[in-house]
Amino acid sequence: MLKRLLSAFAIMLAGQSQALAENIDRHTDWNSLLSSYVEVNVDGVNRFDYARLKRSEEDVVRLNRYLDSFRSVDLDGLSRDAKFAAYVNIYNALTVKHIIGRYPVRSIRSGYISGPWKRVKTMINGVQVSLDTIEHDILREMGDPRVHYALNCASYSCPNLQTVAFTDENLDGLLDQAARDYVNHPRGVSIRQRGGLEVSSIYVWFKKDFGNTEREVIDHLLDYATPQLAEQIRLNAEIMADVYDWSLNDVD
């Protein structure tokens, strides 16, 4: 009896180890592309070298290979964090693929009336899924407002594209860091000269994800603001304007 229990336990551990290895390996190509093409700038805005990627036939193949690797993968069978990380990575990789397919462009919205998000699609587990579906029907439904700091729309005002891929292991820490980076940058929130706050349009478009009221949006900002910024937010605790720059987050 004891031998059977030990054997079952060993099989379970082996399965967990294999699942962990598969989860790490699953994002290797995307991780490599991020480390090669995301440029961290002193102004706090990460930029992507689309032109250099487009010139690299090998890395374009790698990008396509990464997205194609999900054609027969049931992401619903993963843990919550692994699923969240996978969909974020797919969204960001698909956005990059879309840009390099049309590059050079000035904005992801160039040539579209309302943007490409419903039209740009990839195959996941045998089903065509759009950027719009990934963001609104899958990730936002998972109930974590920090998703808005993880998804990158290839634009200046979008939260940074990270230099590493998301995984179930780094997800929570990376989301928190991305939130702090964005909130404490003028793209996220700034104090107007005449008083009040100017915030990213993200907090207006997706207000309900941050609590549904202006007060709750401000409380969210306070959760991630530095002490100095938090003090200024409290002294100017009214959202007076929102802005968003759709210029491509291309390297200078």
Image (cartoon, rainbow, N blue to C red):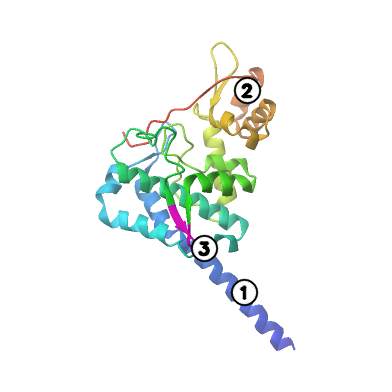
Q: Secondary structure at mark 1?
A: helix
Q: Main secondary structure of the magenta part?
A: strand
Q: Residue furthest top?
A: 194
Horizontal relation, residue 40 to residue 242: left or right: left
The numbered mark at residue 13 is 1
Q: Secondary structure at mark 3?
A: helix
Q: Residue 183: where, in percent of width, then height?
A: 55, 32
**In the rendered image, which residue does mark 2 sit on?**
233
Amino acid at the residue labelled 3: Asn
First reached walking from the N terminus: tag 2 or tag 1: 1
Amino acid at the residue labelled 1: Leu
The numbered mark at residue 30 is none
**In the rendered image, which residue does mark 3 sit on?**
23
Horizontal relation, residue 77 to residue 128: left or right: right
First reached walking from the N terminus: tag 3 or tag 2: 3
The image shows a total of numbered marks equal to 3
Distance from the alpha carbon under mark 3 to that under mark 2: 40 Å
Horizontal relation, residue 56 to residue 124: left or right: left
At 59% from the left and 44% from the top, the residue drawn is 140
